[in-house]
Amino acid sequence: MSFKPLEAIIPIDGRYRGRVAEASNYFSEYALIKERLRVEIEFLIRMVEACGGELESKLPRDWRDRLLRLVEEFKLEEAERVKELEKTLGHDVKALINYLREKLHQIGLEQLSPYIHLGLTSDDVNNLAYSLLLTRFRDEILIPNLIEAVKTISEKARENLETVMLGRTHGVPAVPTTFGRFLSNYAYRLARVAGELASFKFPGKLGGAVGDHSALKFTYPRVDWIRFSKDFVESLGLEYIPASTQILPHDRISEFLNKVSILDAIASNLCRDLWLLSSLGLLVFGRRVGEVHSSTMPHKSNPLHLENAEGAFDLASNTASFMARRLISSRLHRDLSDSIIKRFYGLPLTLTIIGFKGLMEAFRRMIVLRDRMREEVEEHPESLAEAYQVYLRARGVEDAYELVQRSLGKGWSEVLREIKDRGLPAEVVKRLEEAKPTEYVGEAIRIGSMLLDEVDRILGGIGK
């Protein structure tokens, strides 16, 4: 019976599949089986070259090409054959080994059959396959989406570097800043994590049953198996980890997942802040012609893309954080509790992509109500209270804070009156009288510009 998206158990493969369909190339079981096959064949080639002796001279001249074509030609139907074998064997990697033996007989390389998976354990294959898949997902999907998101946020920030807005602390009016400065913080924070993710090197190991290369050392005692393993892992573009048991310690993968968790938490916070600014009437998220945002209220135009993105980011962050912690735990030299968890790598990572796609849609629809932001600042002259008390204390008025706070209780107009009653120099009073909330933004524009320049530098360095 053919699968229909409406029958999906998890919405990623149903409702949201259209947004992240390409993730199937990295997180489907088909993708995992194919990557295991790649590792098995790459290892087989290296084994023959290192230990094959006269065997290599008896092989067809194009034996390497024939093996590599098995990976290139590995279609879904081939993976289904592996799954048929697994039904009988009850072991996914062993099923792949038997499948590969069948293929070697079909392509005239049956003499290589005994060397398949020689001296390896399942996790020697699995850890390399997962790291290769995660590397490609990071490079081909995650980082491009992050770059697009950070650039979009940065562009909106630059457009609004001088757009005055009322800063809020504890949810209540504080002092003025600019909307561009506010966004530049997020652009910088996201760019910094994106840079760390882009430069991250995924780990790998070979080691056999308990990590000591025992079977291969027993069989080929003259080979330096530590050097062999290091060279093989690094030839795949991975970081060699010598401290392994039967499994690759998950410390490095956990570092990656924790960075993803932090990234998602930052992005979720941005969604909440934009949502709050929308609820204050400072931002509007448009509704497309024909769209309905409420089943009962025709007038509603909701920031639904922000809300959906926030939920995706929160779920991704918590899932990635849990996985990072849990994967570090393994009983003695091996247990299988990590295996099922690793099969869900795609859950937090595809949720992250769903979140950023939703956030970008929100930014495409976002209208900044600059005039309203400015009006709100003007409606809160008390936002100059900080400026007043600091300026006065710097000129010797010891109780300036208390003076401003006390007079504010009677109304803003009383503040200047009580200051004048102190008999301060005219130029001091004049400086305060001329102060305007809309101009009280300190170094906001300069800081915002500096942060955005740093964002450009980080993004420019990604991939170099």
Image (cartoon, rainbow, N blue to C red):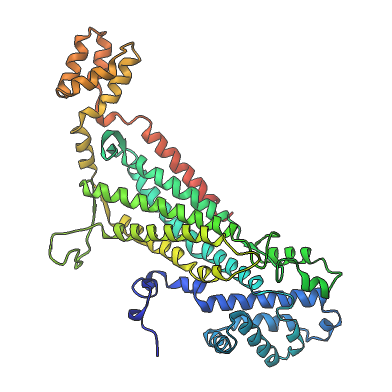
Q: Is residue 117 above or below residue 195?
A: below
Instruction: Estimate the x, y position of residue 418 in percent, counting from the top left.
Output: 19, 14
Residue 55, x across and y down, in percent: 83, 83
Residue 413 in percent (x, y) is at 15, 21
Tell me what residue is drawn at x 69 percent, y 65 percent. 233
Residue 184 vertical position relative to residue 106 in the rendered view, above or below:
above
Is residue 151 in view?
A: no
The C terminus, quarter of image: bottom right
Q: Quadrant of the N terminus?
A: bottom left
Residue drawn at (49%, 75%), measured in percent from left and top? 28
Count the marks: 0
User: Is residue 360 something one can see in this rendering?
Assistant: yes
Q: Residue 133 appears at what percent x and percent y? A: 56, 69
Q: Is residue 65 left or right of residue 453?
A: right
Q: Residue at x 47, y 74 (%)?
A: 24
Q: Nearer the viewer, residue 222 or 277?
A: 222
Left or right: residue 440 compared with residue 73: left
